[in-house]
Amino acid sequence: MDYALPMLALVTWTTIIWWALLLVRLSEIKANKLLPAQLNTPEDARELLSLRQNMLARNFANLLELPMLFYILGTLSILLEVDSKFSVLLAWLFVASRVAHSLIHTGYNTVLHRFYAYVLGGLILTTWVITMLLNSVLL
């Protein structure tokens, strides 16, 4: 099964968010004539830069938190040669949930919608873990 493709898709999405963050942040630093020393901490950035920049920064951090479990599950599935169309579907569904979360978070940012996308991703990962555990015990 090809678990690498959804993993590459999420890496690509994370890279896109990083570039968006970098471009917005550098543009604001230049426009506001800020010095690097003025942005020593995330709190400084929250205070001195726009909400848009802060939402991108938080979303980028989100793409490095829960998805860590996704990358571990994908890597284990590759290493253990798990042959499951269902697990590959779960991987793609997780990627879709993270893209949806990002678009909500960095777009119109309705917290309840963002929460639904976040929980959906967690439920997908939980299902994948349970599936792998059951397959390991039953095989």
Image (cartoon, rainbow, N blue to C red):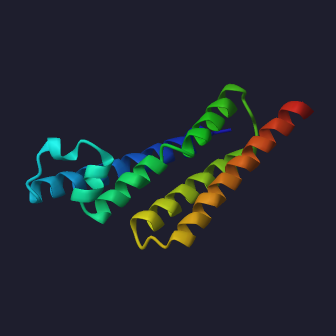
Nearer to me, 97 or 61: 61
Residue 61, horizontal then vertical, whole percent? 43, 47
Give left or right: position of 19 versus 78: left
Residue drawn at point x = 63 percent, y = 39 percent: 2
Please state, as top left, top right, bottom left or bottom right, where the N terminus lies in the image: top right
Residue 77, horizontal then vertical, whole percent? 69, 33
Quick check: can you spot residue 90? yes
Residue 69, horizontal then vertical, whole percent? 61, 40
Nearer to me, 12 or 58: 58
Nearer to me, 58 or 96: 58
Give left or right: position of 52 versus 96: left
Please state, as top left, top right, bottom left or bottom right, where the C terminus lies in the image: top right
Quick check: can you spot residue 86? no
* Residue ranking furthest to the right: 138
Give left or right: position of 79 versus 40: right
* Residue ranking furthest to the top: 79
Residue drawn at point x = 26 percent, y = 50 percent: 44
Quadrant in which residue 115 is drawn: bottom right
Nearer to me, 32 or 70: 32
Count up the numbered dots: 0
Residue drawn at point x = 48 percent, y = 43 percent: 64
Residue drawn at point x = 45 percent, y = 70 percent: 109
